[in-house]
Image (cartoon, rainbow, N blue to C red):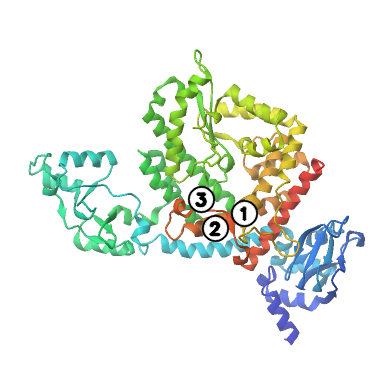
Amino acid sequence: MSAIHASQLSFFAAHAPFDRMEHEHLLWLLEHLRLAYYAKGEVLVDPAHGNVERLFIIKQGLVQGSRPRSAEDAVFELHEGETFPVGALLAKRAVTSVYRAAEDVFCFELSAEDFHVLLELSLVFKDFCTRRIAALFDQSNQAMQAQFAHTASEQQSLSSPLSAVIRFAPVSCTPDTTLRAALGIMHEARVGSMVVVDGSNKPLGIFTLHDLLSRVVLPGLSIDSPISEVMSPDPVSLPPNAAAYEAAMAMARAGFRHVLVTGRDGVLQGILSERDLFSLQRVGLRQISGALRQAENVESLVALSKDIHTLTHNMMAQGVAAEQLTLFISTLNDLLAERLIELECIASGLLDTPLCEEICWLVMGSGGRYEQTLNTDQDNALLFTVPEGMTADQVREQLLPVALRINQSLARCGFPLCKGNIMASNPKWCLSMDEWKAVFSDWVDQGSLEALMHSSIFFDFRPMAGQNHLAEELRNWLARLARSNSRFLHQMAANALRNRPPLGLVRDFVLNDSSRLDLKINGLTPFVDAARIFSLATGVMQTSTIQRLRQSSPDLRIPPHEVEAWINAFLFIQMLRLRHHYEAIAPNGNAEAQQLDNLIEPGQLNDLDRRILKEAFRQARKVQVKLALDYQL
């Protein structure tokens, strides 16, 4: 092999898709390449040149793409290792942008004829060229899957520290507590054990339901006796950093079923049962969904919310795609919220009144779009019909206290209260059918740009619990109203175009003051906003961004391959966001304590993910170009 081939192989081994091509196909490519130089300001390819004659692979330097009308209107940048213009070569047409050297550039060039030969030779190269961002996304997913599979096998095993296995706060009492009182507490908390502690919360003993039979019932002891008479003294305890297998071994040696977890000062931190330890490997969708439906109290739902996080990690390790992953998370969150709403309605007595047949709990925002991650606050509302003989205010008066209980309990389960107070406990968003129609009519018919910007998530509503047909009636009515109002759609589009994807003119990305990017606002929101407008314009009833894009595209005459590129870009940013959230909570498993955000530092991404993120932002710009053209903005 010649020295020049050796250096070229080293270059191509660092960039997709060449790093995965067969060696013989890569050698064929090298034999057919030529190296070209372009001075700063020189045009590499232009729409005026006609059908594209060669493929460019940047070896060194920076290339900017711009609209033909202005060389200063840079819309994207291409760096070392990037390939262009693949779409034009595949279609055997001219490019639609001007590609100009932003600094001195060296490019490898492959003739159009050889490009099409290589497509047939190499399946890897063909997959990359025909699927582009999807192919890069697959490669990134494979790397991420390997990473999470490794950590999942560690975290969901008997090697886990006890601090990561504790699921419930321990139930405890003092030594002079009577058996009658202790059993009442155990029954209320639905636990099978009681830890006896001193005044400093240090364990003195443990009492279990097994002890009830052998030490109380059979000997005929009065249940008014103090629990200290029948407890097992000096229970075994381990520190929080001890491995779960140590607790299992201690149980096996001594023949007991519980281990206490205590800190350095001896203060009680938790209790683990044999069942807790040997269920580590069995956190699955069916088990969690079943437990959510059967949960008897909010405390159980709080614990199960942590299991949803664990399942999310396991699914990432199994390579579950972002679209399915967010749907799984949203579905389980729905089950949790539905059960919580039911429990609070029972506790408040609302379930026993005729009014329960007149209400529908609505969820909006990411929840309404089935796009929840591990960082999802509350966006909800109430819709009701007014029974005969009552007024809307009278119904609202009965519903608001229950809604407040539900909002507060959801916060305990890891869904923070909405900072903007878009919640069912706010009288402003607990409305009758007629009142909701009046609100939406005001937004659609005469809403200002500012008002529509703040109200956009309301157009993503869907039913969560209660009478679903009420939400369907409101959705059908709204679809007819919005589709016929061009002024409203034009204003929604103008608002959407305020938020531009942060692609830089000198560097890859435009960063905020902390040198970070907001994946939600800068990355996902352009797709979400555009999909919402497309669906309102075409009467699509779906609320998820992906389904809105797919179902509205035929009426808007958007080519399927273009829509799929947008969707893949959206999914990549969503997966990057999920990974960011999980890495933030992984050390202690507590999302609430971590104050999760959506901010990442691009410099900490690997080269492949940086490249895909740039391409994803380019796709976001293309979505916005479509909006701008449709609404002449």
Left or right of 412? Residue 123 is: right
Q: Position of residue 336 (x, y in %)?
A: 45, 41
Q: Earlier in the sequence, mark 2 or mark 1?
A: 1
- Give the amino acid type for the residue marked by disc 3 in the picture: Leu
Labels 2 & 1 near each other (Cβ < 8 A)? yes
- Give the amino acid type for the residue marked by disc 1 in the picture: Leu
Query: How crowded is the residue under tag 3: few (<14 C-alpha within 10 Å), some, or many (20+)?
Result: many
Q: Secondary structure at mark 3?
A: loop
Q: Secondary structure at mark 2?
A: helix
Label 2, label 3: how many angstroms apart (C-alpha)?
Answer: 10 Å
Label 2, label 1: how many angstroms apart (C-alpha)?
Answer: 10 Å
Q: Tell me if residue 633 can be seen.
A: yes
Residue underneath mark 1: 519
Circle on res. 580: 2
Q: Position of residue 440 (x, y in %)?
A: 65, 29
- Give the amino acid type for the residue marked by disc 2 in the picture: His
Q: Position of residue 93 (x, y in %)?
A: 86, 58
